[in-house]
Structure formats: C-alpha cells, structure tokens
Image (cartoon, coloured by chain):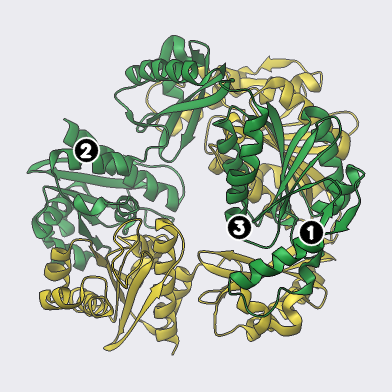
Chain colours: A yellow, B green
Amino acid sequence: MHLELLTIGDELLLGFTVDTNGAHIARELATLGVGIVRRTSVSDDAEAITAAVREALDRTGAVITTGGLGPTADDLTRPAIAALFGRALRFDERHWERLREIWRERGRPGELPESNRVQAEVPEGADVLPNAHGTAPGLWLEDDRGRWVAMVPGVPREMRLMLAEQVIPRLRRRIPDHGAVIRSRAVRTTGVAESQLPGLLGEMARGVDGLTLAYLPSPSGVDLRLTARGLGPDAADAALERGIAKLHEAVSRYAYGRDDEDLAAVVLECCRAKGLRLALAESCTGGLLGARLTAIPRSSDVLLGGVIAYANAVKVEQLGVRPETLAAVGAVSQEVAREMATGARARLGSDIGVGITGIAGPGGAVEGKPVGHVCIAVDDRGTLRSLAGNFIGDRAEIRYRATQAALDMIRRSVEA
Amino acid sequence: MHLELLTIGDELLLGFTVDTNGAHIARELATLGVGIVRRTSVSDDAEAITAAVREALDRTGAVITTGGLGPTADDLTRPAIAALFGRALRFDERHWERLREIWRERGRPGELPESNRVQAEVPEGADVLPNAHGTAPGLWLEDDRGRWVAMVPGVPREMRLMLAEQVIPRLRRRIPDHGAVIRSRAVRTTGVAESQLPGLLGEMARGVDGLTLAYLPSPSGVDLRLTARGLGPDAADAALERGIAKLHEAVSRYAYGRDDEDLAAVVLECCRAKGLRLALAESCTGGLLGARLTAIPRSSDVLLGGVIAYANAVKVEQLGVRPETLAAVGAVSQEVAREMATGARARLGSDIGVGITGIAGPGGAVEGKPVGHVCIAVDDRGTLRSLAGNFIGDRAEIRYRATQAALDMIRRSVEA
C-alpha cells in the first residue's frame, strides 16, 4: 500500500515550524510496510488544500492530512475536504455534548467556549476519530471508489495518539498479512568521524548482504542505518539482526547502542547493573547533562543529583574546587574538571562524579582555548580520568557534544 | 514571486530525517517577499523527481530542489532534471580539476576519489553553483520560457551557504526593488489556553487590520502570529508593529515576548536590568531549567548556578530542606518547593531562588498528586510565592511546561 501525506499550515510554508509530524508518520507507517510516496505541505488556504488532496487522491487514492482542524478561522481542512468529496457539514449535537464532557472531565475552567462548536461539524458519512488529548477530533472520509482521506490534528501529541489508536488500526485492516515491510535498524556510534567509518567497515561500507547502509551524522555521533526492503517481516528482522551484528563488530570501539537508544539511557543502565550512583558538576553545560539523564524515566535510582556550578564561587563553595587551581590554570582546565568531578562525588556521596567545564561560545575564547574547548573528568570510585576536546558547531551543538562525550566517558569507565 | 520547494531523499519519506532545510529556505525567502506556495518531498527515484519538478514548473515556473546531488548511485537529481529540460550531461574537465583542487586545499587524505567524477557532469547550459563546504556543486537550469530550477545539496551546512551566496543573489536580481514582502511578527503568550484567546481578542480573533492571525500552540504556550502579505517592506513593518501592539494589549496578562524570543532570555534580561542574580533548585526538571538559561549566551552575569536535587538527601544536605517537611507533606509539595527556593538563594548567595519539585511521570503518581503535578516556588529577595499546577503531556512536555511556568513566575515577580 502506498499513500501520500499532506501537512497543512501557513507556519510550514513560512518556515516557522519544522515539520516533525511528517517524519513521525513516515516511521510509523514504514513499520507496517506502508510507504509514503510523496509528502506535500500547503498553507491554510482552501484552494491549495483542495488541489493538493485532489492530486494526491488521483495518484494514490490514500491521503493522510495533518493540521487545520482547530476551532479558529484559519482551520480550513474540514470544510475544504468535505467540499471536495461533495459532502455537507452537519452539526452533530451528540458529538458537541461529548466535547463538552471531555472539557469538564479534564478540569478545565468554565464551559467549553462556543467557538469550539465548529469542531462538532462533521461531513456527511465521515467517521469521527476521537482526540484523547485535545478538542479537535480527526475525521476519516471515504468515497464510493474506496479512496480515502484521514484528517488528524497538527499538534504533535494529539496527532501521535490519534495515528496510533485510530489511523493505524484502520490501515492494518486494509493490508494483507505478512506482506513485505520496510524495516531499518541502526548501530549508534560516537567519538568517530563519518569519514573514518568506511575504512573501518571495509567491504560493508556500501551495504551488508543486500541491505542498504546509510551514514547519518549528528551531534550525537554517526548512526549506521541498515534498511531492508521487499522482505516479509520475519526475513527482514533476521537479515537486519545479522547485518547489525556484523556492523557492530566492525565499529565496536565506538558503538554505544542500537536504533534510537539514547546514550544517557545506556549509561543509566550500565550504572544500574553495577549498583553505581552518579553525581554531576556542570559548568558550561549548565544542567544539560542532568536534563538528559533525568529525561529518562526511573533515572532516580542512579542519579543523586548535581551542582550547576556556573560561577567560580559556586565551584569553590559547593564543590570544593581550590581557588589556587582556578588562579593557576583557569576555570576551563582538566585540573578544574577533575576537582569538580571529585567534589560532586564527595559532596553528594555518589560512586561516580562527573565534571564538565568549557567554552561554549560564541564569546569567551582565550589563547590556546578556542570556542568549543571543553574539559571533562570522571571520578569513578576514586579513579580519575580526564580529557580536553575541541567540539565543533554552535553553542547548542558544543554543549550537546560535551554531554555526549561525558556520557561516553562514564560508559567506558563503568564497562572497563 | 512565488516558487515551490522540492526536497529529495529516501530519508525524508522513511521519516529518518526531519526536514529542517525546508523551514530554513522558507524563512530566508520570506524576507525577500518570495513566497513558497507548496513544499513537496519525494524519494531518490528518477520518475518521482521528474514528475514533481514538471508539476511544480507548470504551477509556478520556479523551483528549488535540495538533495540528490552527491556522487553515489542514489543521487539522481542532476540526470533527472537534465532529462526533463532536454539537456545532455557533459563532463566538464575544468570543473573536475577545481573539485580536485578543493579536495587538496582542504587537506583531505589522498586524491579526490574517481567516484566523484559524476559531480563534474554538468547539464548543457546550466550554471554551476560552487559549494564552499562540500564536493557536490549546485546547478541552476533555465529554459527558454524563463522557467528555472535551482538545485542545492541536502547537507544543511552546504545548502545554507549556497542558498545565501548563490541562490538568493540570483533571486534578488529577478524581483523588483521595494516589491511586496511576506513578513510576520508574533506575540508569545504562556499560561493561557488556545481556546480562551479568541474571547480575549474579541474582534481581532480572526485578524487585525487586514493582517492574518494564526494561533500556534506548543509546550511554550500559544503564539499569536500576524502575517502581512502584498505590502512593501516599510508598510508591512508599520502595519505589523501596530497590529502586534494591539494584540499585546489584549493579552498583556499572558504575553512574555515577541517573535522568537525565548522566555529564558526574557527572564535573564529582566534580572540583568535590575542587577538581580539567580540560583536554581531543580528536582523533577533535573537541570532542564539550568540548561535553558545557560543556552543563552552571557547568562553567566545573572545565573550563579544551582543544585539538581533529585534525591531527597541532596535536597536536605545541599539545600537545607527540613527532613520534617519532607516527612509531613512529601517531596512534591509547595512547602518543599519553597524551602528549595530559599535554600538555593541562601546557599548560592543570589537575590532570587527558584525551587521546582513534581511528578514528571510516567510513574510516581499518588493520591491527590497525579502525573504532571508540579510545585514551583520563587524566593525573590525574601518574598516567597509558590504554586501547584497540573501540566499535561508526556514526561518531556511536563518538564518543559514546568520550566516555562517557573520562568514566568520569575518574570512576573521581577516585573511586579
């Protein structure tokens, strides 16, 4: 089965919103073996919406739209597509009552505003797709030739749930069992340049056993992604499992995880397995390492906490960094990173302490310490390791790369 | 001038890459008054590329493509579009020499691989657009009716420079001076539901003085974006300035900034203006508030630092939260948030202390304290304020909404 995706909203054409919905929907559908053959974005304009849906239906007969279902005047998806299908909009009293109930159940103040009434207008013959996270319901509209449009909201959280609970089950019923799927698996690496990987991979540099290989560089590192096309689900899984194992072996020194595993989650798991507790001391990353670790549920059994030591006085008073060290080598130095790591470990009573200090830019560079220069230290049960790296990118990338390098240092230390 | 944007790559249709190029190009072109009327993505498939370019040329006569210009077998943009224009590909010896020189100048190892020869194949009559950051040159191809396609690489860094240095100057020469522009401005609000805004805006709910109004909800709050189309640059700016001022007045209670201002930057500026220093005590947000504040350059003159007090022992030992308070009302309580705020202020010696404690989920809910329940306190020079809120969304959204609410509390306190 092939379909097209249409994302609707002025913000997409003005560039104020990056279209993350499209990527999410594409990934979810690929796991079903449903391929998106074209993605289109148009503005909140009835004519543009109508033309794009008509063309997509002519090509594939199957369209998912996101956006333009809200209660305000710029929400035109529902009337435009109803008109294209020649269906009148009918105010649905029962549906309106349900929207009002949901509003009350969620403990929102007062009554659902009358401005939301338009959301209870349903095209004749349409299925209403309930929205568990918002007031804008989705719609499924089908013509007598079996051509259909599924309309889901543009708000990512609402879209994701409706896709999973309403749209995908309907698609499953339309596709034959054990058809070919499109599946991908990845080995995640960090601390190695993209251009070094083909050398490490040798004959696998272009693909493994008929699976295509893509190199995906990002501030996390480089992901090596294998994709199987045209195989049934079991054959695809088996081929990918074998391929991923081969790739992993070739780059094992730099591989920290698979698929969409986050290095923060890998580190928490490594520490948890050995019963080790973690404490942080962050200067240039200012809490970003803590934020990454605590983004993972149940991080509290490993992470005790940390100190955001942005000012030098906080480094001295809260972490015990020696003023003489600061005076002698400066705050951005391996020595200070080491005293921060040891201080965090001692003050918070953890097994492992991590210290990060650096120059995130855009200002602050000094002789011998350019923007991107970051010192990281790990005190793992009394064994101190440190490094100084020069990370590339803007302030956000430098900070992210610094947390990634710190996490990888913890991983290597705990796994050593 | 209107044009269409075509982004090319299997990655985009499999959903492994979020299309950030589209948003960047749209924003850059809007400042010239060049509107993108449709965005399309197709896979690395010659037929799909040809069809999409042909249709876009028929609609607007002007297309920018990204991607598919590399040296590998899946890079089909150049031959597909050359064939559509009826132009032969010619190997350009001088261009090949230049590519080899660039390779050497950049200190790359060895010689430019022969596999890159295809990048020196230029369609007859095409302009080559040099690539300062990579080996894939761009191309500008135009037919005898003045219809054109600009092909730029898909790697964001290469695309951005080529757009700025090669494509935009060519577009400028094609549009009349002081022509109409597309400009937008926004009022950013937080702490108010999207559906409450039309009531506050009254007659402006659909637009202001001919400017279109869009409601853009996100975990930051709801942005109200006004867009001017068809006016010259000065008239557009003046109309937007008036419109934004009217909107701001109507929602002033909830408005914290304009355009793409980050509330963290607004708070730093408020504190800086009054010479106030800030210290943080974060439990459920685990460093995210610190990360947001330190993401802003020069935050160090306001933010001293903070304590990530994830474990209760850290709350007690590093912040002075009383064990009796923890025992009596639990860690997720306004009382503990208040003691955290006061503790951060006292221990780090700041003017303002902020405490955040809550249940980010997915687990951890208790009677009367559901997932999303977060307590926030601000101690502003000895004056304590606190609140308890129930934030919606997944773990990431709840945490982000909590930092946004904490920042808004600081802003209101400092501005009071």
Q: Nearer the viewer, mark 2 or mark 1?
A: 1
Element assignment for label 3: loop
The answer for how far apart the CA atoms under marks 3 and 1 are is 19 Å
Mark 2 — on which chain does it sit?
B
User: With B207 as the anchor, is B98 left or right in this view?
Assistant: right
| Among numbered discs 3 and 1, the one appearing first in the sequence | 1
Residue A131 visible? The answer is: no
As displayed, is residue B188 above or below residue B361?
above
As displayed, is residue A255 above or below residue A88?
below
* Residue A308, label in figure: none
Give the residue pinned by disc 3.
Answer: B132
**Three-letter amino acid code at the position of disc 3:** Ala
Marks 2 and 3: CB-CB under 8 Å? no
User: With B157 as the anchor, is B270 left or right in this view?
Assistant: left
Q: Where does the image place residue A217, in percent across and percent down from the top left?
A: 59, 65
Give the residue pinned by disc 2.
Answer: B270
